[in-house]
Image (spheres, rainbow, N blue to C red):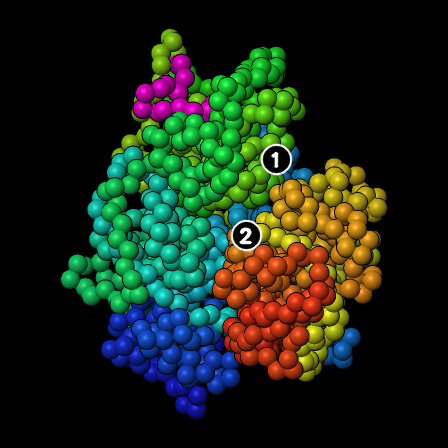
Amino acid sequence: MDPPSAGSPYQPVIEALENHPQKKFYNVSKLGGTKYDTLPYSIRVLFESSVRNCDGFLVKETDAMNILDWKTKQNHVEVPFCPARVVLQDFTGIPAMVDFAAMREAVRNAGGDPVKVNPACPTDLTVDHSLQIDFSKWPETVLKNQEMEFGRNRERLQFFKWSSKVFKNISIIPPETGTAHQVNLEYLSKVVFEVKDLLYPDSVVGTDSHTTMVNGLGILGWGVGGIETEAVMLGMPLTLTLPEVVGCELTGTVSPFATSIDIVLSITKHLRQAEVAGKFVEFFGSGVSQLSVADRTTIANMCPEYGAILSFFPVDNVTLKHLKHTGLDKAKLEVMEAYLKAVKLFRNDESSSREPDYSQVVQVSLSSIIPYVSGPKRSQDRVAVNNMKSDFQACLNEKCGVKGFQIAAEKQEDTVPVQYEGNEYKLSHGCVVIAAVISCTNNCNPSVMLAAGLLAKKAVEAGLVVKPYIRTSLSPGSGMVTHYLSSSGVLPYLSKLGFEVVGYGCSTCVGNTAPLPEAIRNAIKQGDIIACGVLSGTKNFEGRLCDCVRANYLASPPLVVAYAIAGTVRIDFETEPLGIGFNGKSIYLRDIWPTRKELHTVEEEYVISSMFKELKEKMEKGNKRWNLLEAPESTLFPWDSKSTYIRCPSFFDKLAKEPVAPQPVENAHVLLYLGDSVTTDHISPAGSIARSSAAAKYLTSKGLTPREFNSYGARRGNDAVMTRGTFANIKLLNKFIGKPAPKTIHFPSGQTLDVFEAAELYQKEGIPVIILAGKKYGLGSSRDWAAKGPFLLGVKAVLAESFEKVHRSQLVGIGIAPLQFHPGENPSTLGLTGKEQFSILFPPELSPRMTVDVKTSTGKVFSVIALFENNMEITLYKYGGSLNFVARRFL
């Protein structure tokens, strides 16, 4: 990034930092004047980016002016955003890098220079999501699981190693380091970037929904789809509607019994009620200074759960104190502070300081927060811990739905005896069979992890145990967590309760967990028991953990341990003991719950400085297995036709130099007729590969045994596997079938088939397909294969009542038309059965949100809204998607 010249389209004011004349920066505060002073801090970062990247083409002067006029332009204009960097995790990173390799191939075939195909935006890729738990006994656990990972994922790792050698501007962070969001937070985050003596705010987009964690450090960042991320990597700005910014005022004092997770879930409830979906949230007020950076990052991480784009904590004295403890160089810290204050990106926590203008203000009293869990089926359904027993009883009584299980009254006290490891146990409704402290965001906060460890220590010392059939695990976000749990002396106690360190990567929450013991599974099914999983994560969609565990609760790490000890969620911690300790004494939760003073003392002594020092040493030292891994160094990747992990996809087969007029969709059949709230979990392949699935049949045909299937995440570099895994979720409810199953009807033959098999038949017959859906199509984590998979299945358009915003843009980015029914209309009101054939009549010239006519084979004609939000999206669609649009630059 070179300092601007006098002839740039929008000349920023450049000044030298006081006492640091060699540093340059864009003085956007002086440039924006009084309007700038009223902007929310998050919008100030957008304004700085627009000024710095203004080139008169992708980013125009009018864009900067629109951002400066945020107060009147919010929700009304689209603005570009050029983040400082990109982060990827390997589940989404592997298809991105495979796309880059395929792009080199396509550019070479079209007569271009493949060497030019490189990321333009600095990119870091962390190999973290492929970990599967094969062994669960410490201390050999981590080494054995890592050996297994390097064994089964060797092809993928070799491809990553090749990528690190041949692509410029990208770094690969090898396995065993930590999860993407943890490494991003602890190592990659700069707060202030410095490139060629030019200072500017750190900002980031990533393919992981937990990218928002960095907002707790005052770094603007959020998760987007893999397709948009690849475009950003290639130098395209993100386009977003200038958002509303909700100011969340925190007041009061935190209760000593409330953890960061309780604060998170309470704030989540308030923000859900405030309807902040698609908005920025920014925190202010006297309560903010009471929250550590770890607290803030935990809160910021949860914003996808309440629908916000991001939740921003401006840099303040608490941030600087944290950065000092992490070992940041004193001189750099001084430069950072001086720069942020000069451009008014530093939040003064004095009560007399003026707060920015906000679209609306939500007030949250920290004093009112009490411990909660979330569940049993949705993360937004919060249950006060002191009401847990009665709430679960209500769930047993309620009809099947978002909370109810509809268990007959006479069966609610049923028990099923089961023999396990020579002892007899009795399973009943509410029994805990999975208890996982997982590598998902809570681990970024040392206080809650230490609370779990100290609680375990007190429990063991009191004589409490966990029943051996409960699948317990501890999967830290990074080695630093293990380090401070070990150095503080609590790790052995967690181990004694069964919470062994199983590795560093996403595990239980993405389905990468060892199966329950067969005896336990059989007992659950035999008695139709509502068994429970309790985990310290952020997602608990029904059936996500295990198909026989129907009730899943999110809880803080110490409560995960507490429920594991209790063995059931049907317990009132106030009046009922966790268990019987030494000498027959009843032990209550209050007896072993650590105080805030205990936590603070241990955290200061064992965590802050040492964890960051060790991480930096680990990053500098590297990974022995990774360092010894061999990989080719050729400009083009040597594709292996026998590989079941890496395949050259067909996305760039029709690389176009010029846009193509939109083609009509003629006589399309409906591949799937879906209802409301179809998530990307339903669409995109994730977790283990079922033995009866289309993907399993493919892998079997390649000579693999079920033991060698690995997971969909590990095989995201193979489009043949991923296409077969699209819509393969066992909870998919297709109205053509009438019950949850990954099936559909191939109408020309009348056969009921796997979704892939039906789509394959349609493609052989030359028949296009579409999807009918209800409200909020594409809800959930952003996943590129939720768009890529349907595209390769031959889907030309999705007709839905409404779309999740990120998924809608992904559909456009891959070349699928998102078409929305008019308000008040849906397939039922229009009298559609889904068995008709549909023709979509696109005009030669498209315009944003224009009306498009649809005609059915029964003669019915109706119109829908083509959800192209701006002319740039229309251009991308005409090129066959954003990747093809950007790739043409290399020709």
Q: Three-letter amino acid code at disc 1?
A: Asp
Q: Three-letter amino acid code at disc 2?
A: Asp
Q: Position of residue 831 (x, y in %)?
A: 61, 59
Q: Position of residue 719 (x, y in %)?
A: 72, 57
**The quarter of the displayed image where residue 463 is located:** top left
Residue 110 magenta: no
**The quarter of the displayed image where residue 855 is located:** bottom right
Q: On the picture, is 200 further left or further right than 880? A: left
What is the spatial separation of the Cα atoms under label 1 and label 2, in whole angstroms? 22 Å
Q: Residues within 10 Å of mark 2 (few under 14, many from 20)?
A: some
Magenta span dominant secondary structure: loop
Residue that appears at 30% across and 37% down: 370
Q: Position of residue 430 (x, y in %)?
A: 48, 26
- 57 and 831: which one is in front? 831
Residue that appears at 84% across and 46% down: 701
Magenta region: which residues?
Answer: 567-581
Identify the residue position indicated by label 1 in the image: 547
- 248 and 334: which one is in front? 248
Identify the residue position indicated by label 2 in the image: 676
Circle 2 SS class: loop
Residue 342 visible (yes or no): no
For residue 827, above or below residue 663: above
Q: Are marks 1 and 2 in contact (CB under 8 Å)?
A: no
Considering the image in quadrants, where does the C terminus appear?
bottom right
Residue that appears at 29% across and 41% down: 369
Closer to the observer: label 1 or label 2? Answer: 2
Residue 575 magenta: yes
Q: On the picture, is 30 further left or further right than 89? A: left
Q: Residues within 10 Å of mark 1 (few under 14, many from 20)?
A: few
Q: Residue extending furthest left?
A: 352
